[in-house]
Amino acid sequence: AGAGLEAVGEIRWMRVNTLRWSVEQAVEWFEKGGWEMFEDVEEMLAAAQSKPKVFALDAHIEPLLALPASVSLPTMSAYQDGRLLAQDKASCMPAWVLLAPILADAEEALTNGLDVEGEEKKRGKGLRVLDATAAPGNKTTMAAALVAGEPINGKVTACERDQGRFKVLKDMLKRADAKNVQPMNVDFLSLKPDDPKLKNVSHLLVDPSCSGSGIPSRLDHLVPSAPEEEQLSRIRALSNFQIAILSHALRFSGAKRVVYSTCSIWEQEDEGVVMRVLGKKEFREMGWRLAPRDEVLPTWERRGRVEACGGDKDIAESLVRCLPEDGTNGFFVACFVKDEDAEPIPA
Ligand code: SAM
């Protein structure tokens, strides 16, 4: 799925902050500084054994670069000034999965001419994204970068309930120069999904607090594939909270695409949450379903666990999982899309 077992802990993922820079400028900057570019992350890692200044373009996420983990970030001017941001590959997946189709449509509309009637909607003009659980702001700033400027000129509303973390979010917005983000120190659950001020929100990121069982510093070599007995009640409480946040997002009147993610490797917080939400009549009647694999990082190999999806292979295929052996944190991504032709929910 990723860069192979030998890659664990060897990669430093860097996202090009396209609010300040372009991928082309980044590549030029590295090459001028004597860095050698590789098209393939594994080749880059092999070359890093003998040369320290190597980097690669990621195969799945456009603004993402892979560098050897040994690279010294504080000495890199492009990191100091926020043109490059340190962000794990898995953490880049939600915003990419949420927005890649609209970016592709926008590009196509640009190529075919912008003035065609009806094209404005197609190219996502004025797109409104809402990040339900935003701090420290990695996914917020990535979404902001993807929709900023022509042709989309999109905006992001970023909710963070915790006051201390809200400050961290605002600092990150400044560092990333994310002027198209409106941060709100608010409990997402207190927003009204039918609030007329939020009716244009069509794309939502839902990355709620989780057990963090996929974060390598919390993973030892004996990490269980399921939580220990004594952790179960905490995991149950977390998954109920995750379902509440995800369900709230799916109720937004203009919502068309909602990406749910966790940095947990446990199925109770991952497939378990997805299955419980898909099982709700309310959401089936609204026309919510999972986006198929070909819209959700189709070439990423590690997908949902079939048994945890009630044996449904299609559901499992539409989900993305990451493990440290993929060269990323342990992570989970699900993308819900609303079928426009579905009957509206009865009043
Ligand atoms: N998406 C973030 C990023 O990539 O940088 C990480 C989000 S972190 C996993 C979850 C965040 O959601 C925490 O900062 C937590 O304080 C916040 N949070 C939890 N419940 C919330 C709620 N009901 N409304 C808004 N924020 C909430």
Image (spheres, grey):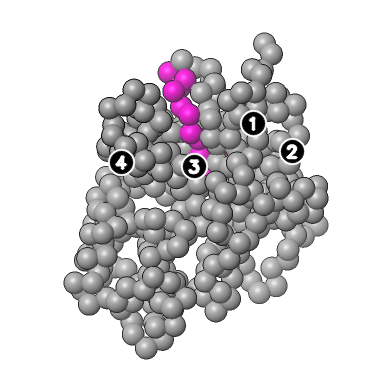
Q: Residue 323 appears in which quarter of the rendering?
A: bottom right
Q: Which residue is mark 2?
A: 276
Is residue 38 positioned above or below 90 on the image?
Answer: below
Amino acid type assigned to the residue bearing label 4 in the image: Thr
**Quadrant of res 126:** top left
Residue labelled with disc 3: 98
Residue 298 part of the magenta-drawn span: no
- C-alpha gap between disc 4 and disc 3: 22 Å
Note whether ligand 1 is within 8 Å of mark 3: no
Instruction: From the image, tell me which residue sits under label 4.
Output: 111
Q: Label 2, label 4: how many angstroms apart (C-alpha)?
A: 42 Å
Q: Looking at the image, is mark 1 or mark 4 earlier in the sequence?
A: 4
Residue 336 visible somewhere in the drawing: yes
Q: Which residue is mark 1?
A: 288
- Residue range in magenta is 197-212
Amino acid type of the residue that numbered disc 1 sits on in the rendered structure: Trp
| Foreground residue among 86 and 258 | 258
Cα distance in 3D space between marks 3 and 2: 21 Å
Say what amino acid the circle numbered 2 marks: Arg
| Residues at marks 2 and 4 touching, judged by CB atoms closer than 8 Å | no
Task: Report the side of 59 relative to 33 (left or right).
Answer: right
Q: Give the image quarter of residue 301.
A: bottom right
Q: How would you rate the neighbour count of disc 4 (Cα within 10 Å): few for under 14, some for 14-19, many for 20 or more?
A: few
Q: Identify which residue is drawn at 63% across, 61% down.
A: 302
In front: mark 1 or mark 2?
1
- What type is the residue that disc 3 sits on? Leu
Label 1 or label 4, whichever lies nearer to me, is 4
